[in-house]
Image (tube, grey):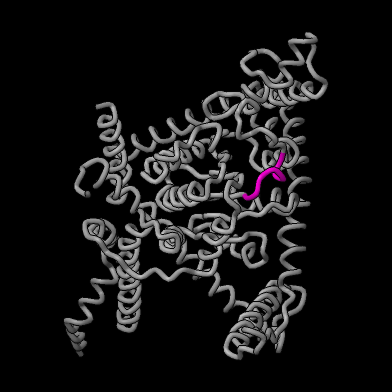
Amino acid sequence: MSRPNPPAPSSGQGFWEKFAKLDRRIIFGFIFLALALPLFFTIRQPIPVSPEGKAYYQAIENLPAGSKVLLSFDFDPPSSPELQPMAEATFKQLFTKNCKLVVIGLWPQGPQQAERALASALRDPQFSDKKLEYGVNYANLGFMAGDEVVIQKMNSDIPSTFPSDYKGNATSSLPIMQGVKNYKNFDFIINFSSGFVGTREWVQFCVDRSGAKMIAGNTAVQAPENYPYYRSGQLKGLLAGMKGAAEYETVSNQPGKGLTFMGSQSVAHLIVMLFVILGNIAYFVSGRKR
Amino acid sequence: MPDMVSITIAGFLTLGIMSFVYKDNPIYKLCESVFIGVSAGYWFVSIFYQSMLPQLTDKIGLTGELTDSALAYYRQTGRLASGQWFNLIAAGLGIMMLLRLLPKIGWISRWPLAFVIGSIAGLRLIGELQTNIMKQVKESILPLWAPQYIDGSLNLGSSIGHSLTNFVLVVGILTGVIYFFFSKEHKGVFGGAAKVGIWFLMVTFGAAFGLTVMSRMSLLIGRIDFLLRDWLHWLG
């Protein structure tokens, strides 16, 4: 007795079976196009500002004019698409309020990122007239190895922790550092971080031990672990990833790369969601056939 | 001109790294090795010039580059200020750590290692207890009815919203903790609570994964923007 031939697969099932075995390089190609093509067009989408984004902006806005602010750059170039737009917009808002800025880095490339953000902010015509001076209005104390131990040591003696600045000048010779001993001599602290050492360590060793007020900008991948600090009041504001940068640019009315890049981000997310849905359909359809 | 050369090199290195998406290849391996080598070199130079020189040789008066109080004291008295001697102890521990490179006396490196582990463990223990346990537990004790007032009168919608948020947070914490409580079998009401805890954990992992995807996309956008704008000048 001969066995009956199996029924020929319908064209629909054939498509889903092929889709389930789709070469992942095709998906990579779609993602690349989804990220690249929107950069050629001006895609402006409404960016709702989260409470923590609003709080970040408001915390700086509430600072008295001329406040002394410490900024720590704890990231390297790979994270700059997320953190650099936040840093540039933050510098601009702080300079608008005539704040005195002291920059440090606990990652070796941090001070270099700060230099780039500072240069970008200082190129803005609204600050070129102010004749902001290095050592008087702002200073970059450079990098110091030691991770959380550096944060802890700054609680007692900042000039001793950073004896010289990024340019090799003695820290004690900078006018902006006159009278600065520890965190109590700063009105506010801002941290940009993409991992260890970063916001978590700043909250542990600076905020909770010295009572300093702090806001932070994080990469999206790092932000979930730091949201509880915002809720508990240990952070006064928090920006999460490129979305956070776009929120801050929106609320501070400083359109920049954060908003420009969000177009690509949104299109790519749609493509990812589409492939997740199609992939699941393909899985169930081909699974049912088996 | 130098900028153009460096941007072109960076452009080709970016493409070389991206070529791994197609498959592993010698160009990717070359770019990866260049990246590791340059990073290690940059780290070494940064740490040497920005940390070791100012914190060690300058402070104990070996280089005389700085005019800080320690060096002034050294110049006046010909002696090191008492506090600066601690830097020599740190230098000694650092040299002991390097002895790991000599197999016969490599065991000496265990002593500075023990010092580092002990001091960091002590430092972090307090920080974790204070920041991540005490403070977070305190902030998790929330009222399940949180009335919100606007101009002295009760705002019912906002009150319900805040109360619901507090309720979700409290239930999420309790059921999450129950899920990780393994001394009692997950059965009955206890098992049901553990299952709710799993749901909360899954939502948490989903949110974290979504943010991770966003983060990785951002990195790629940065590289694509560099290729199209800074290198090829295709974007305005």
Question: Can residue B196 be seen here?
Answer: no
How many labels were placed on the picture? 0
Outermost residue toward the top in this view: B78
Which quadrant of the structure image shows residue A181? top right
Q: Residue drawn 21% across and 56% down?
A: A40
Q: Residue drawn 74% across and 20% down?
A: B70
Outermost residue toward the right in this view: B82
Residue B151 is left or right of residue B232, and the answer is right
Position above or below: A259 against B126? below
Q: Residue drawn 36% across and 57% down?
A: A255
Q: Is A185 covered by the magenta stretch?
A: yes
Please state the horizontal and vertical placement of residue A102, each as a whole percent of the image: 58, 39
Please state the horizontal and vertical placement of residue B211, each as a whole percent of the image: 47, 63
Which part of the image, by quadrant, shows the C terminus of chain A? bottom left
Residue A270 is left or right of residue A142, and the answer is left
Position above or below: B190 against A92? below
Residue situated in front as seen by the camera: B60 or B109: B60
Which part of the image, by quadrant, shows the N terminus of chain A? bottom left
Magenta-tinted stretch: A182-188
Question: Can residue B186 be seen here?
Answer: yes
Outermost residue toward the front in this view: A129
Please state the horizontal and vertical placement of residue A116, each as a whole percent of the image: 42, 39
Q: Is B25 covered by the magenta stretch?
A: no
Residue A123 is left or right of residue A190, and the answer is left
Position above or below: A279 against A42? below
